[in-house]
Image (cartoon, rainbow, N blue to C red):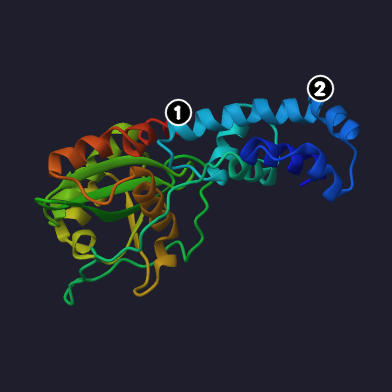
């Protein structure tokens, strides 16, 4: 911080005497007045305009976006700027993203009798186009009535939700409903890979029959590492951070909030023609 800026700040906060501060900092009063009356530089004007855009994006995200996502939104709007600059302006303006809590509950339950599908991805989460690789997972929302479970399917190519379902239970029906929505919305061609963990919902015969009927090839990651389904894990972390609250009074309130947030936006967010 420059001497003149420090003087100006202290004068505003404490009504300190200008002469005394200039003497302590060894600067002239005329120099201070010249600095104060100088018109804003081009860079300062650009920063002020950029800060306004940052505030609008941060407010639209309900105060959940940190600088990486704010920067991504700015780039999507055609504004070229450095991520460090966005972080600095947000810090200066007192803006920050939400803090994510640690996940405590596990939704993966394995059956010792089930036969898991082979891992066709080997942690290589890259798709050449839409509807080539989907990843599936289940998470939960805390309510005063109990947990509300959310099953979802992501398209790896665009990292967006293409199907989802919510229920008060962890039976196979919840993941089957998410799959049916994804198939209905995207109408994928045969050969698409659906990657998941080895939970009983995904190894169930009824779920396998739905995949086979749609021409979808199952793939399942190995046990014991979140990296086996990293894209879905990342989405869960982001979704829980963006929701802004840790507990809802009812399952219906949780359904309404989830449906109006990342899920409803993402189901139409892939763009392009389904293949």
Label 1 crowd bin: few (<14), some (14–19), many (20+), radius 10 Å: few
At x 27%, y 44%, the residue is 214
Q: Give me the C-alpha separation between circle 2 and circle 1.
A: 51 Å
Label 2 crowd bin: few (<14), some (14–19), many (20+), radius 10 Å: few
Return the x and y of residue 78 as percentages of the image width and height.
64, 27
Q: Give the structural element (helix, strand or loop) at label 2.
A: loop
Question: Can residue 191 be seen?
Answer: no
At x 44%, y 46%, the residue is 132
Q: Give the structural element (helix, strand or loop) at label 1.
A: loop
In the displayed structure, does residue 125 sit left or right of residue 9? left
* Viewer-proximal residue among 218 and 176: 176
Residue 205: quarter of image:
bottom left
Comes first in the chain, label 2 or label 1: 2
Return the x and y of residue 239 as percentages of the image width and height.
36, 47
* Viewer-proximal residue among 177 and 7: 7
* Viewer-proximal residue among 33 and 111: 33
Q: Is residue 76 above or below residue 158?
A: above
Q: Is residue 180 above or below residue 233?
A: above
Disc 1: which residue? 273
At x 14%, y 39%, the residue is 252
In the displayed structure, does residue 244 sit left or right of residue 209? right
In the displayed structure, does residue 220 sit left or right of residue 254? right
Q: Quadrant of the C terminus?
A: top left
Return the x and y of residue 189 as percentages of the image width and height.
37, 39
Residue 16: quarter of image:
top right
Q: Is residue 173 above or below residue 36?
A: below
Return the x and y of residue 272 as percentages of the image width and height.
48, 29
Is label 2 or label 1 in front?
2
Disc 2: which residue? 39
Q: Is residue 29 above or below residue 224?
A: above
């Amino acid at each position: 911080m420059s001497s003149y800026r420090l003087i100006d700040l202290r004068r505003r906060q404490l009504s300190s005497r200008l002469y005394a501060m200039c003497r302590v900092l060894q600067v002239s009063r005329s120099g201070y007045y010249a600095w104060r009356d100088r018109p804003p530089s081009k860079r300062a004007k650009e920063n002020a305009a950029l800060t306004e855009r940052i505030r609008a994006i941060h407010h639209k995200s309900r105060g959940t976006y940190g600088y990486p996502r704010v920067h991504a939104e700015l780039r999507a709007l055609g504004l070229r700027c450095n991520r460090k600059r966005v972080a600095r302006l947000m810090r200066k303006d007192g803006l920050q993203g939400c803090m994510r809590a640690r996940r405590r509950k596990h939704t993966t339950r394995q059956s010792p009798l089930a036969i898991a599908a082979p891992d066709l991805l080997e942690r290589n989460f890259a798709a050449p186009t839409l509807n080539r690789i989907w990843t599936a997972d289940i998470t939960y929302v805390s309510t005063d009535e109990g947990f509300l479970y959310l099953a979802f399917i992501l398209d790896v190519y665009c990292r967006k939700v293409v199907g989802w379902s919510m229920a008060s239970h962890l039976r196979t029906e919840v993941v089957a409903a998410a799959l049916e929505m994804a198939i209905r919305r995207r109408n994928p061609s045969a050969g698409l890979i659906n990657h998941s963990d080895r939970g009983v919902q995904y190894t169930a015969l009824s779920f396998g029959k739905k995949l086979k009927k749609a021409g979808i090839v199952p793939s399942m990651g190995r046990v014991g590492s979140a990296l086996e389904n990293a894209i879905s894990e990342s989405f869960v972390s982001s979704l829980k951070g963006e929701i802004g609250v840790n507990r809802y009074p009812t399952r219906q309130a949780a359904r309404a909030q989830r449906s109006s947030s990342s899920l409803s936006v993402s189901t139409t967010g892939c763009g392009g023609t389904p293949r």
